[in-house]
Image (cartoon, rainbow, N blue to C red):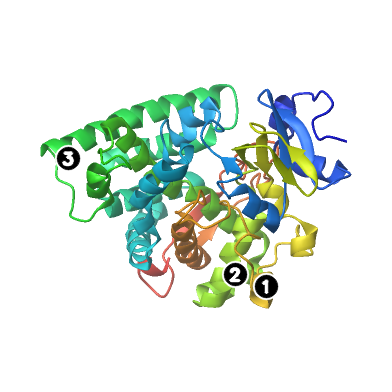
Amino acid sequence: MDLFSRPLVDRSAAALVEGYAWLPNRMRESPGAVVRTRLLGRPAVALRGPDAVRFFYDERHVRRHGAIPEPVLGTLFGREAVHTLDGDAHHARKQFFLPLLHVDSIAGLVECVTQAWDEAVPEWAGRSEVVLFDAVAVVLTRGVCRWAGIPLADDEAEPLARDLIAMVDGFATPGPRHWRARRARGRQEERFERLVRDVRSGAAEAPSGSVLERVGRHREADGEELDPRTAAVELLNVVRPTVAVSWFVVFAAHALELRPENRERLAADDAAHAAAFVHEVRRFYPFAPFLAGLAVEDLTWQGERIPAGALVVLDVYGQNHDEGLWGDPYAFRPQRFLERPVERDELIPQGGGDPRSNHRCPGEGLTIGLLESLATRLARLGCTVPRQDLSIPLRRIPTRPRSGFVITDVHLPESGGAAAA
């Protein structure tokens, strides 16, 4: 039977209500290799698995332009962002982001963020309690702005961190969180646009080689420089995803609290275990539920027809919890990443494909580098985790521990120095 031969009920509301479980549940119920449904008024087909990842990221099959709904552009990515482009325009814009993949760039960001962490720990020690999610967001904001060459006064860090977190927190939900995200994006786009204009006019100085300098002089495929608003959007698309690592840092803290056997090896600078632990945090804990694009032309996937213009949906959360790939997917077990090499398109918490040539997140290496460093510091941090609600609701997207992960009695380790905290 043709994939779309019968009318389909729009399941957008069900996806919002069921959260991360919606698409994996439909995949389990489906008798075939795909799920056919309707989302945002469009016919849609959902896929899963490494072969599906390669199919999805092939620009001959799937395009992003026109696929990202306005509520997501108005909160998470920004209009005219690199995520909305395809072909030559996408490849040209991507040149701004590719230097972020270089090992020296990753090391530079990690150094700036860990310095901000080490500066923050003594201040945390003076508080009666610290909500780790909020505190880490401020650390990441200070660190990424320092690294990117973005001027940031001491009293600006917390408001900026709140806005950056709000952009991520409100992209997938209607209601107050969504409107808070829109207001946050509007404020910060205006602020970053003024900064870009000031750099171009000479009223502000961008450090040589910094992200701020590069976005100011970036040229598009037609040779034209980015308009200041789009430059601001892309500058935010470096800063915002870095601060979104707050989710993974708190997930790492959650894993260490519930599975303390990981703490000793992390604290001892076991590099192999740190890498495996970080990959397992990114696989096990929920962040992006799925990704979507539009079929470029009439396509066929494993015998199923996909008409041109249909939504093609990649089941990210479901693939990261696929028993066929992971064996015991709902067990937190870093050792799995030491037992066998994992292929690029198997683990996809931040998408799949090649970040140099398609839409895979270029900041994935930055995320991994930051998590390896901060997870080690978490393992060494002296503190108490009081009784609280550490449940992680799967109906909330993006989710996190309900309490934000509260810690008390923060103190420097006996070995001395904030750098070991």
Rendered-image quadrant of the N terminus? top right
Give the camera-side residue of 296 and 167. Answer: 296
Please name which of the two marks, 1 or 3, marks the residue nearer to the observer: 3
Kind of element beneath mark 2: helix
> From where the camera sits, is residue 152 visible?
no
Give the camera-side residue of 24 and 389. Answer: 24
Compared to residue 162, the image places residue 376 above or below, namely: below
Q: Which amino acid is tagged 3? A: Val
- Percent x, y of residue 35: 79, 40
- Percent x, y of residue 404: 56, 44
Q: In this rendering, would 344 be left or right of 160?
A: right
Q: Check residue 335 in the rendering and tell me which mark sits there, or answer none.
A: 1
Mark 1 or mark 2: which comes first in sequence? 2
Give the camera-side residue of 104 and 244. Answer: 104
Q: Residue furthest left?
A: 202
Mark 3 or mark 2: which comes first in sequence? 3
Residue, x 73% and y 28% (percent of image)? 38
- Residue of label 3: 199
